[in-house]
Image (cartoon, rainbow, N blue to C red):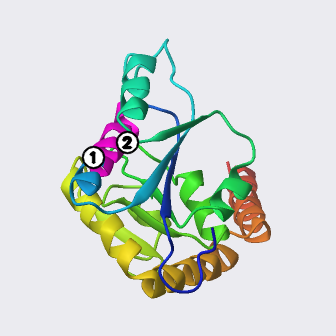
Amino acid sequence: MSLSGGASKCTRDIICCRLLIDKGVEVFAKASRILKGRNIEARFWLIGEPDPGNANSVTKVKLMQWESEGLVELLGFRQDIPDLFAQSNIVTLPSFYGEGLPKVLVEAAACGRAVITTDHPGCRDAIEPDKTGLLVPIKDPFALADAIAYLIVNSDVRYKMGEAGRALAEKDYAIERIVAMHMNIYQDLIDKAKFN
């Protein structure tokens, strides 16, 4: 589904992450339930697998329950993330996990997708609020549902956020820039070691 143009028949919202409670997976499912209750048509793709060895993992039983209720579509573990992002309209990460800089948000920006994430360290640092995406409070499915509904209805805003996200990825997250930053760090360490 294209991000450009007017209203789409059905907006696709993706969460792609380790299926941990702290990544906001339950918040995502609850937001889907809220939007269904408002008769807002959207498809919620859940990409990833549960981690049965992790007590923080969403269980397979819970995932199957959400799918049977029509809240999410389970895509499982995938390696074709850019292709899936190309078919989506919004990428969501309602995480309250101890994030660094979430790679999924950088990838979403690089793919020109509007992002909804939490006002939480790491997550909020990956976007330019109200320019490349929207910030919502942690553990708040109603705020998440409102943000998703806003971007569904306002496809022009969603498209502009995607374009701005792509520009941000090219400016701040290009591999050449990241490598140069790392090389500068290493050079600083080498220079400091010379004086010890």
> Which residue is tagged 1?
33
Write down the region rendered in magenta: 21-32
Residue occupying the point 69% across, 77% down: 170
Secondary structure, magenta segment, majority class: helix
Which quarter shows the N terminus?
bottom right
Specify the label residue 83 is tagged with. none
Say which amino acid is labelled 2. Answer: Leu
Q: Is residue 173 above or below residue 140?
A: below
169 or 60: which is nearer to us? 60
Using residue 116 as the reference point, say whether residue 196 is left or right of it.
right
Residue 12 appears anywhere in the view:
yes
Task: Tell me the quarter of the picture where residue 20 sits.
Answer: top left
**Residue under label 2:** 71
Residue pictured at 35% horizontal, 32% vertical:
21
State if disc 2 and disc 1 touch (CB < 8 Å). yes
Left or right: residue 91 versus residue 135 is right
Per the image, label 2 sits on a secondary structure element best described as loop
The tally of labels here is: 2
* Residue 23 lies in the magenta-colored region: yes
Q: Is residue 192 above or below residue 86?
A: above
Q: Position of residue 70 (x, y in %)?
A: 39, 40
Across and down, in percent, residue 178 comes to 71, 64
The residue drawn where x is 19% and y is 56% is: 142
Q: CA distance from mark 1 to mark 2?
A: 6 Å
What amino acid is found at the position of numbered circle 1 in the picture? Arg
Closer to the camera in the image, 42 or 163: 42
Badge 1 crowding class, 10 Å Cα cut-off, few under 14, some 14 to 19, many 20 or more, is: many
Crowd class of label 2 (few under 14; some 14 to 19; many from 20; radius 10 Å) = many
List x then y, in percent, for residue 126.
49, 64
Image coordinates for residue 43, horizontal then vertical, percent? 46, 54
